[in-house]
Amino acid sequence: MSDHQGDNIQHVEEFAARLRSFCGDLSVLPGNDHDEHVRGSVMLHRLGRFDTLDIDCDLSEVVRDRPTTAREGGHYFFFVHQRAGTSVFDQAEHHFEAHAGSFFMIDDTVPFRMANPRGPVQQYSLHIPRFEMPSDLLLPQLVGASVVPNGIIGSMMCHLVGEVMKAREDEDQLSKAAEAFFDLLRLHLRAVRRESNTEDLNRYHLTIFAKAHHIIDSNFRASNFRASDLAETLNIPMRQLQRAFAQSGQTPSRAIIERRLAFAKAKLESSGSAVTRSRISTIAYESGFSDLSYFYRQFWDRYGYSPGHWRREERAVDSD
């Protein structure tokens, strides 16, 4: 299954809107300061339960800033293969140049900036929901950093990306290629571990931030789950938990609310026009909200429309 937009010239905001629909809110700049248009294409493919995105464009810069991460939270890791061109990437303490053949990881809960100073680039990204990320790959030094070196492992992984792209219509081949890809990445990480000293090994542990999101994903549907419960589960003081979230510009309490809202929105979207007031109430409670009025206010503030947006009668009133 794929959604294809061929090579063309578009206004930068049109291209940005399409990119945001796949990757969340981003700020973009065209390749030419004196031209408000972008030459490029975006292709979305569904690979099993994951989305992948092919991007070929001449944007000069893509940014996800601190206010955006605070407002939206984050639910994905983007595992990116730089297929052509050069990008300069900054996230957290990491800064590096991605050249053709590079692989790097983006965490959408942390602000980042990616510049393309030398013209058009081609990238292929795998969008992995946080709760489906293999735990042995969720390591602090991977986020915002190049994760595969030059050499035989990098060459083999580039080859496997090609195999994955060719196998989109063959589920069996796709599964085998994807499994081999992650096996190679694990092989590389084991080699890194062997060469690291004790201080380096400590950096491989999941950060408090990453652990907190995993706990939120497992508990947000319980209406009595609060930030204090999160701190207790992590066995750390609330102050330390707040500091862990400070870099994203979001509080632990807000992160829990955002996860509940995202879950509720997905449920409402899947219900479509068949959703009823009773169903909205059920979804609100299933999402961890114990107060329906509070749910409506939070939903409106977050998305700019009510939870009843999909109901036929409300759409009819809106259209009038």
Image (tube, helix red, strand yellow):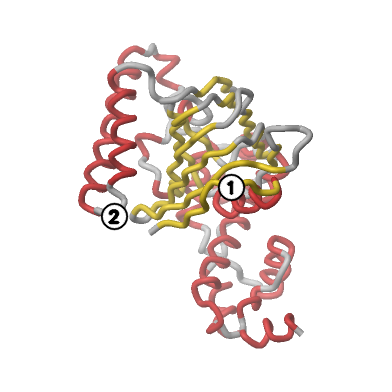
Q: Determine the secondary structure under disc 1.
A: strand
Residue furthest front as drawn: 8
Q: Are marks 1 and 2 in contact (CB under 8 Å)?
A: no
Where residue 54 appears, x then y in whole percent?
A: 47, 43
Q: Residues within 10 Å of mark 2 (few under 14, many from 20)?
A: few
C-alpha distance separating marks 1 and 2: 26 Å
Quadrant in the rendering for residue 194: top left
Q: Is residue 79 above or below residue 258?
A: above
Where residue 166 appears, x then y in whole percent?
A: 30, 45
Q: Looking at this view, is 277 or 271 the one in front?
A: 271
Q: Amino acid at mark 1?
A: Asn
Q: Earlier in the sequence, mark 1 or mark 2?
A: 1
Q: Looking at this view, is 280 or 316 the one in front?
A: 316
Q: Quadrant of the N terminus?
A: bottom left
Q: Quadrant of the C terminus?
A: bottom right
Q: Is residue 284 above or below residue 235?
A: below
Q: Is residue 147 above or below residue 12?
A: above
The residue positioned 25% from the left and 54% from the top of the image is 171
Query: Does 203 sit left or right of 92 as displayed?
Result: left
Can residue 240 be seen here? Answer: no
Q: Looking at this view, is 106 or 125 the one in front?
A: 125
Query: Does 315 sit left or right of 44 as displayed?
Result: right
Quadrant in the rendering for residue 287: bottom right
Residue indicated by mark 1: 8
